[in-house]
Image (spheres, helix red, strand yellow):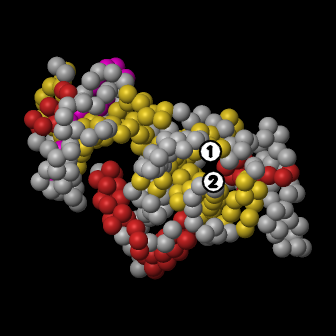
Amino acid sequence: MMHDVEERLRSALHHHADDAPAGATMLAAVVEESTRRRRRMAALSAAAAVTTVLTGTAVAVPLLSPSPALTVAAPPTAAPSSLVPSSPASSPPSPWDTSGSASTALVPAKVPDTVTFPFTAPSTPGYAAPSIWRAAGNPVLRQSLQTPQPGGAMAYTTTAYSARPDPLGPTTPTKVHGRPATVVEWSDDVGAQRSLVWQENATTWLELRTEPSAADPETLRAYADALLPKPSSAPSPFLFAVMPSGWTVDNILPGSVTFCPPNVPADQGFTDKLAVMLNATTTPAGRQVQVGDRRGWLAHQDEATTLEVPLGDGRSLLFQLLGKATLPEEDLIRLAAGTTATPNAEVGSG
């Protein structure tokens, strides 16, 4: 289950945060290690390779105090040459080169300002404040119990789907809100798992799970029945003026947003996508480029491109292209120039 793995990964990253390099340095190390492992696995004729991209997915740490929305300038309607760094082939690149012209691969952004979930979490004493985000294209509601349970803090994660999610194991009939529902049970590398699935209306299916351990069916039903039939929402961390034509947004988290190229399926990872993150400012790597009225640092590795744009307050917007996700430099710079970090954006660790 993806969010189980993500939860353990976040915990491990948080535990080792002081030992980890930051920003583009971590990205370069991860990409280099990924390449070495893939080559070694190919030489051994392994049956499968697992690529894990960690950058920007560590534990999100809320800002200590709200700050005004910061905009890295608005993108131009016509592309002035000042946004496109390039240089003649016969001379080395200048950090402030301003020749060239922009491509037309960008369109007005269709990224929601808020993520809406069809239910509201219960406000019963003992529950922590809920969080709402989008994962693999689906809205998610997560709420933890304030009192630690055996095995750790119990968290309820409810995901809304437009069609019934495929059951991962045997099902047992039950009811939620008086409607037919099923308890699904299976096992994975974590251990025994259990979920509660029901259809709320003609276009909405819901699946409820718990972490770190599987709750019993009665506990799942009690929480599902406590969900209030009223939509709730949370603001997106960024506002975008433009986005790549034909790409879709699959993840909207408190500190990151990911864009999928047309040939990449939605999932909860960063591989083969454009990831936009709010990070603590690092020592920038790469060459200087002009991003609207700010300076940015553009860096290329074998399988990744990053653009870091410091906001001047200890935070940076980080744009990361991995694998199949590629854009011309001028498009990446124009997209960055039209991106705003809202006061609700949370800084990722690492």
Could you say where residue 32 lies in the image, as x and y percent from the top left? Answer: 53, 74
Going 33% across and 21% down the picture, which residue do you hit? 230
In the picture provided, is 11 more to the left or to the right than 217? right
Numbered-mark total: 2
Percent x, y of residue 342: 55, 41
Q: Residue at x 66, y 38 (%)?
A: 241
Q: On residue 295, which mark appears? A: none
Residue that appears at 62% across and 40% down? 240
The residue sitting at 57% across, 62% down in the picture is 281
Residue 198 on the magenta segment: yes
Which amino acid type corresponds to the residue marked 2 in the rendered image?
Leu
Q: Answer yes or no: is residue 307 visible.
A: yes
| Residue 210 sits in quarter | top left
Main secondary-structure element of the magenta-colored stretch: strand
Label whose residue precedes the other's in the sequence (1 or 2):
1
Query: Which stretch is magenta?
Result: 192-206
Three-letter residue code for mark 1: Leu
The crowd level at tag 1 (other Cα within 10 Å; few <14, some 14-19, many 20+) is some
In the displayed structure, 122 sits above or below 191; it is above
Query: What is the x, y in percent for residue 161?
Result: 36, 32
Do callouts 1 and 2 mark residues in contact (Cβ within 8 Å)? Answer: yes
Residue 172 appears left or right of 224: left
Residue placed most toward the observer, 283 or 285? 283
Query: Badge 2 local density, few (<14 within 10 Å), some, or many (20+)?
Result: some
Label for residue 311? Answer: 2
Q: Assign a secondary structure to mark 1.
A: strand
Q: Which residue in the structure is indicated by mark 1?
A: 70
Q: Is residue 32 left or right of residue 217?
A: right
